[in-house]
Amino acid sequence: QVQLQESGPGLVKPSETLSLTCTVSGASISGYYWSWIRQPPGKGLEWIAYIFSSGSTNYNPSLKSRLTISVDMSERQFSLKLSSVTAADTAVYYCARHQSGNVVYGMDVWGQGTTVTVSS
Amino acid sequence: DIQMTQSPASLSASVGDRVTITCRASQNINTYLNWYLQKPGQAPKLLIFGASSLQGGLPSRFSGSRSGTDFTLTISSLQPEDFATYYCQQSYITPFTFGPGTKVDIK
């Protein structure tokens, strides 16, 4: 079955860049939309951005100026880079797949999440 | 951005109870509304997509409906594994937005 696994540093210093990778196993990246979502401690969910397998992207305007997402089809990975981080970026970061090759049908496969803390 | 609200914020219920959670969108989102369940320490899990379509492999006690910009998630007979936080999410337009969640705990 399809599985997603986030990886990256658990601790990032303020003003630095947060970099995460999501590795897809059990299925191809091709033909699907892939999203990043985050959840601050004890709070709700915030959609960050999505990328299609072709490389087209859509970013949350609240983060767009600091955000870059990319896809590596050969490695079956997609990545997130968030620059100039502050304590407000401390959260569990999830990667997820939009089902049926369309963003409207919900996210049916999620990674387990990775906790990122911004602190000096 | 489309604002999503949920009510109640929390509820206490017993096994076997019928539970209803409401989600309201700040503007028309057609049927582009999804429901997720999240247990502590776990990723969200898709329950309902398109306002009323049950995700494959899930029990039929979960159902969803729409009336204008109001959406309802109903659990017909609450089971022990259903105690969790439930989120709605609109997929009509980006940025996709989630409701604040409804926590269902044991009475």
Image (tube, helix red, strand yellow):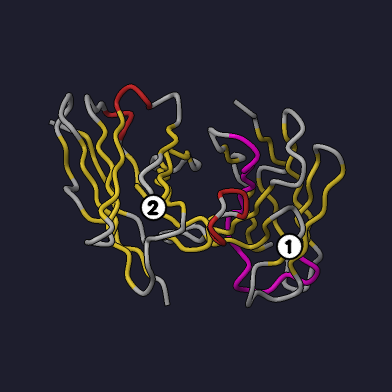
Q: Are marks 2 and 1 in contact (CB under 8 Å)?
A: no
Q: Residue at x 66, y 47 (%)?
A: B10
- Nearer to us in this view, A86 or A3: A3
Q: In the displayed structure, does residue B80 sit left or right of residue B21?
A: left
Q: What is the number of the mark on residue A46?
A: none
Disc ID at residue A53? 2
Question: Which quadrant holds residue B94?
Answer: top right
Indicate the amino acid at tag 1.
Answer: Ser
Of badges 2 and 1, nearer the viewer stands 2
Magenta span of residues: B75-93
Per the rendering, the mark at residue B53 is: 1
Quadrant the N terminus of chain A occupies:
bottom left
SS category of the residue bearing label 1: strand
Residue B76 spot, x, y in % from top left: 80, 68
- Decide whether residue B89 is among the magenta residues: yes
Quadrant assignment, res A30: bottom left
- For badge 2, the amino acid type reads Ser
Relative placement, left or right, of B91 versus B27 is left
